[in-house]
Image (spheres, grey):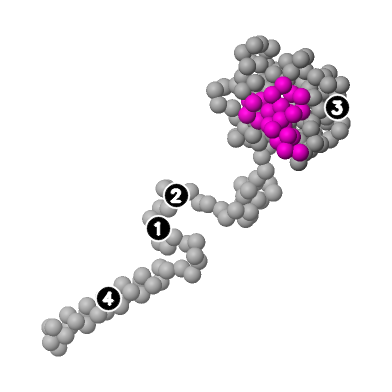
């Protein structure tokens, strides 16, 4: 047999064997990475979300957070724990009453805190409640909304800071929740300024 023919046959046979080996290493599993050398040494095994997992008792891969934990997004910058504390009062009438009786500001009363609260008030509250808290803000002047009660009037003059915090957190009446716009610390600061407006 001709040497060139033998060489061509062996070359074709080798190519065929390589193709068969490569094809046999393929898998129909779309999650299979194929043949890997010691894969657990550099890539830990993963589980599909909500699939069975032998590590946990209920065999679910996605687990609920431990009860009482604080969400990572609520943890404050700068070390203050005021924003990290969970709010324990529900959005109910009983929660509103309990907050009024039990909840007090963690911030010390000071002119500096009230001044910071005034800045927040002017950005977030003045358009409805007015510059002096008399319920005559620019939005009310349009005539499209009824005026809120004045802070120094009978309905709100003696409103406790706990009830104010609860109202800012959940909203009350036509006022919506401001919890997504104001941190807990900012809510307490604006309340300290509102307490000054209650005395006008």
Residue receiving disc 1: 36
The residue that label 3 is drawn on is 97
Is residue 73 placed above or below 29 in the rendered structure? above
First in residue order: circle 1 vs circle 4: 4
Q: Residue at coordinates 42% horizontally, 69% vertically from top-left?
A: 26
The secondary element bearing badge 3 is classed as helix
Q: Do the residues labelled 2 and 1 touch (CB within 8 Å)?
A: yes
Of callouts 3 and 4, the N-terminal one: 4
Please say whether residue 68 is visible from this viewpoint.
no
In the displayed structure, would residue 58 be above or below residue 13? above
Residue at image point 71% right, 30% down:
137
Q: Magenta segment, which residues?
A: 120-143
Quarter in which the C terminus is drawn: top right
Contact check, label 2 and label 3, Cβ < 8 Å: no
Q: How many marks?
A: 4
Return the x and y of residue 30 as percentages of the image width and height: 49, 65
The image quarter in which residue 12 lies: bottom left
Numbered mark located on residue 15 in the image? 4
Compared to 88, does 192 lie above or below? above
Q: Name the residue under label 2.
A: 43
Q: How far apart are marks 1 and 4 (CA)?
A: 22 Å
Callout in the foreground (2, 3):
3
Looking at the image, which is closer to me, 144 or 106? 144
Q: Does the magenta stretch include residue 11?
A: no
Alpha-carbon distance for marks 2 and 1? 10 Å
């Amino acid at each position: 047999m001709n040497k060139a023919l033998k060489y061509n046959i062996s070359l074709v046979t080798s190519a065929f064997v390589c193709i068969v080996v490569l094809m046999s290493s393929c898998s129909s599993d779309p999650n299979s990475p194929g043949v890997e050398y010691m894969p657990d040494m550099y890539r830990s095994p993963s589980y599909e979300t909500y699939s069975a997992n032998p590590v946990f008792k209920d065999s679910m891969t996605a687990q609920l957070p431990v009860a009482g934990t604080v969400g990572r997004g609520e943890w404050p910058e700068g070390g203050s724990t005021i924003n990290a504390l969970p709010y324990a009062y529900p959005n109910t009438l009983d929660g509103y009453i309990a907050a009024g009786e039990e909840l007090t500001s963690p911030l010390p009363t000071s002119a500096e805190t009230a001044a910071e609260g005034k800045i927040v008030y002017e950005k977030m509250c003045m358009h409805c409640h007015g510059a002096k808290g008399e319920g005559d803000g620019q939005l009310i002047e349009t005539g499209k909304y009824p005026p809120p009660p004045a802070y120094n009037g009978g309905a709100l003059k003696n409103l406790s800071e706990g009830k104010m915090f609860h109202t800012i957190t959940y909203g009350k009446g036509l006022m919506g929740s401001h919890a997504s716009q104001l941190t807990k610390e900012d809510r307490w600061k604006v309340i300290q300024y509102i307490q000054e407006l209650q005395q006008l």
